Image (cartoon, rainbow, N blue to C red):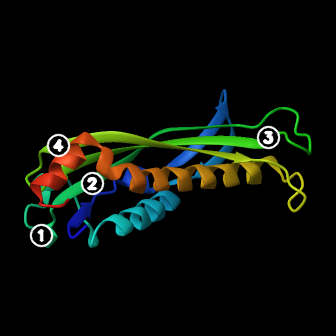
Amino acid sequence: MPLVIGLCYSDEFRSFVYRKSSGQRVLAAFALGESSVKLVDEALTLLFARVVPVSGLPSKVSGENAVAGVIEPKIADVSYEVPSRRVVGDQVVARALITYAFTLYSREGEQLASWQVSGRGVETPSAKIGVVPAHRSVQRSFEQAMREAAWKLTSDFRGVPGVRRWLDEQGVK
């Protein structure tokens, strides 16, 4: 699309770490923020003529880089599971889910659309990898889930009602 879009990442998004705990004990931690930044950057670069980082939401970026709008992503939900019995064959080694929430703002700061995109990843044993350690399996599942969510972001973007109205207003068909 022949538009320049601003992209506003919060510090919380950039540094997001998912921690699975049991009581006071952290069982596992997965740094998902920087990988999410990279994927969202790549996905939006496929959609827009130019994607520029902005330091804040539209009320703070009024003249910054002459953007047509600003998108702010958030990580809304994250989960994973590792079945207690991992058996080579058709069984799942690890499953992961990530849900991103996106908000589109006009250049004047009006919220135009808000939607969510989820991705799922499933790591299964194969002849090549065998049964890998659980942490690595979960990490691979998260990578798959994030890629699926990025694909859904690009493929479903024009179908979001508020986005479609905004694109019409921008003269993009």
Q: Residue at position x 43%, y 67% from top?
A: 42
Disc 1 designates what residue?
66
Residue 92, numbered label: 3
- Marks counted in the figure total 4
Eye-nearest disc, 4 or 3: 3
Where residue 131 sits in the image (x, y, percent)? 88, 51
Disc 4 designates what residue?
111
Give me the C-alpha separation between circle 1 and circle 2: 14 Å
Eye-nearest disc, 2 or 3: 3
Give me the C-alpha separation between circle 2 and circle 3: 35 Å
Q: Residue at position x 15%, y 72% from top?
A: 65
Where residue 85 sits in the image (x, y, percent)? 88, 34
Work out whether mark 4 precedes mark 3 in sequence or the reverse, and give the earlier one: 3
Give me the C-alpha separation between circle 1 and circle 4: 18 Å
Residue type at mark 3 is Val
Residue 71, numbered label: 2
Q: Secondary structure at mark 3?
A: loop
Work out whether mark 3 precedes mark 1 in sequence or the reverse, and give the earlier one: 1
Residue type at mark 2 is Ile
Give me the C-alpha separation between circle 2 and circle 4: 10 Å
Work out whether mark 2 precedes mark 3 in sequence or the reverse, and give the earlier one: 2
Where residue 74 sits in the image (x, y, percent)? 38, 46
Mark 3: few/some/many CA within 10 Å (<14, 14-19, 20+): some
Q: Secondary structure at mark 2?
A: strand
Eye-nearest disc, 3 or 1: 3
Residue type at mark 1 is Ala
